[in-house]
Image: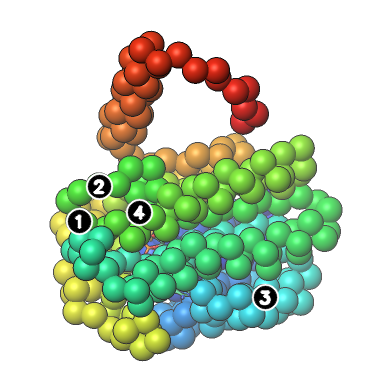
């Protein structure tokens, strides 16, 4: 997609951070923008911000972990703008500073409910509406570099599980949409200067309620890329129809190290196979 003027985008988790950065970049390219978020106050402020830029913008308070709520929001956006061209499934939350055995079932439900099921609900609600007008479009799913490697420093295993799943989901969606005029991107930034580490402060009661672990934002996030830069990165990736969308060059070495370790597993298998030959079935990828 090259010409964004007059196209309509919907962005989840758009009240702050990267989602708002995307909205500002999209508005700057002449797009209509629908902002979806679970926090009503920040959403209202974000809408005012977009309108101050001169954007044709709307907002719908939406909990992306609720399939029916996402479907209702999608219908409202389509009714208001007459179409949806770009959908960014971006809302996300983070549990940090906990080992796997310490993460509660409610915390798993929250992280997977927002970060994974939120993306699934978004695809199910937005994709049929993008197909409907036939002019093509694009879906962006926000994963993270944490969807490609599991960092040890911040102890975020539940988050990484959800983000690996978003990468797999996006790869599956790309298979589904190959040969169509609808593109897919999976966004995998590293540090962006946002309130993501504060998300436990807003954890809903049904997932255990607010948690003070959200009071600490690490320095590397404070020193991160700006949300506006992240938004411009996403806009450029849609224009180029890039599938894997990275932001921080140092993370390339992290992935090379991870993949080297995986390939070393094959070397071990080859040594084992040499002593124990077995028929190799042909598999389709
Ligand atoms: N900031 C980073 O360094 C970084 C790095 C990699 C990936 N990400 C991802 O970027 C995305 C955006 O996060 P951010 O960094 O801008 O943080 P953020 O906290 O500023 O934005 C996340 C937004 O999602 C909203 N949200 C939370 N639960 C929701 C729900 N149930 N329904 C709808 N909205 C909900 C929040 O209210 C918030 O406005 C997330 O998916 C996050 O995992 C962030």
Residue at label 2? Answer: 151
Mark-to-mark CA distance, 4 and 3 = 26 Å
Task: Confirm if mark 2 falls within 8 A of ligand 1.
Answer: no
Callouts 2 and 4 close, C-beta under 8 Å: yes
* Residue lying at 76% horizontally and 37% vertically, measured from the top left: 179
Mark-to-mark CA distance, 1 and 2 = 7 Å
* Residue lying at 35% horizontally and 54% vertically, measured from the top left: 160
How many neighbours does mark 4 have within 10 angstroms: few (below 14), some (14-19), or many (20 or more)?
A: many
Q: Earlier in the sequence, mark 2 or mark 4?
A: 2
Give the SS element for disc 3. helix
Callouts 1 and 2 close, C-beta under 8 Å: yes
From where the camera sits, is residue 69 visible? yes
Give the SS element for disc 1. loop
* Residue lying at 56% horizontally and 51% vertically, measured from the top left: 169
Mark-to-mark CA distance, 2 and 4 = 8 Å
Q: Earlier in the sequence, mark 1 or mark 3?
A: 3
Mark number, residue 90: none
| 153 over 128 or under it: above or below | above
* Residue lying at 47% horizontally and 71% vertically, measured from the top left: 113
From where the camera sits, is residue 23 visible? no
Q: Mark 4 against mark 3, which lies toward the viewer?
A: 4
Q: Quadrant of residue 248 in the image? A: top left
Callouts 2 and 3 close, C-beta under 8 Å: no
Pick the residue in front: 233 or 153.
153
Residue at label 3? Answer: 71
Mark number, residue 160: 4
Q: Earlier in the sequence, mark 4 or mark 3?
A: 3
């Amino acid at each position: 997609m090259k010409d964004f003027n007059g196209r309509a985008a919907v962005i989840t988790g758009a009240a702050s951070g990267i989602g708002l950065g995307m909205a500002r970049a999209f508005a700057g390219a002449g797009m209509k923008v629908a902002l979806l978020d679970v926090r009503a106050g920040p959403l209202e402020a974000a809408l005012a911000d977009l309108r101050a830029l001169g954007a044709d913008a709307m907002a719908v308070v939406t909990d992306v972990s609720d399939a029916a709520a996402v479907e209702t929001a999608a219908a409202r956006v389509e009714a208001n703008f007459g179409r949806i061209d770009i959908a960014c499934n971006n809302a996300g939350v983070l549990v940090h500073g906990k080992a796997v055995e310490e993460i509660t079932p409610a915390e798993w439900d929250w992280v997977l409910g927002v970060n994974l099921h939120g993306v699934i609900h978004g695809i199910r609600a937005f994709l049929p509406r993008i197909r409907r007008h036939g002019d093509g479009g694009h879906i962006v799913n926000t994963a993270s570099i944490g969807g490609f490697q599991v960092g040890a420093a911040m102890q975020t295993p539940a988050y990484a599980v959800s983000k690996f799943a978003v990468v797999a989901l996006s790869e599956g969606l790309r298979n589904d949409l190959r040969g169509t005029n609808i593109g897919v991107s999976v966004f995998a930034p590293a540090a962006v200067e946002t309130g993501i580490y504060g998300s436990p402060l807003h954890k809903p009661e049904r997932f255990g309620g607010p948690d003070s672990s959200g009071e600490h934002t690490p320095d590397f996030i404070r020193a991160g890329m700006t949300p506006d830069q992240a938004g411009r990165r996403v806009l450029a990736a849609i224009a180029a129809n890039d599938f894997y969308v990275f932001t921080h060059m140092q993370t390339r070495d992290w992935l090379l190290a991870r993949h080297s370790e995986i390939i070393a597993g094959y070397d071990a298998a080859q040594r084992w196979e040499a002593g124990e030959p077995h028929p190799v079935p042909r598999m389709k990828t």
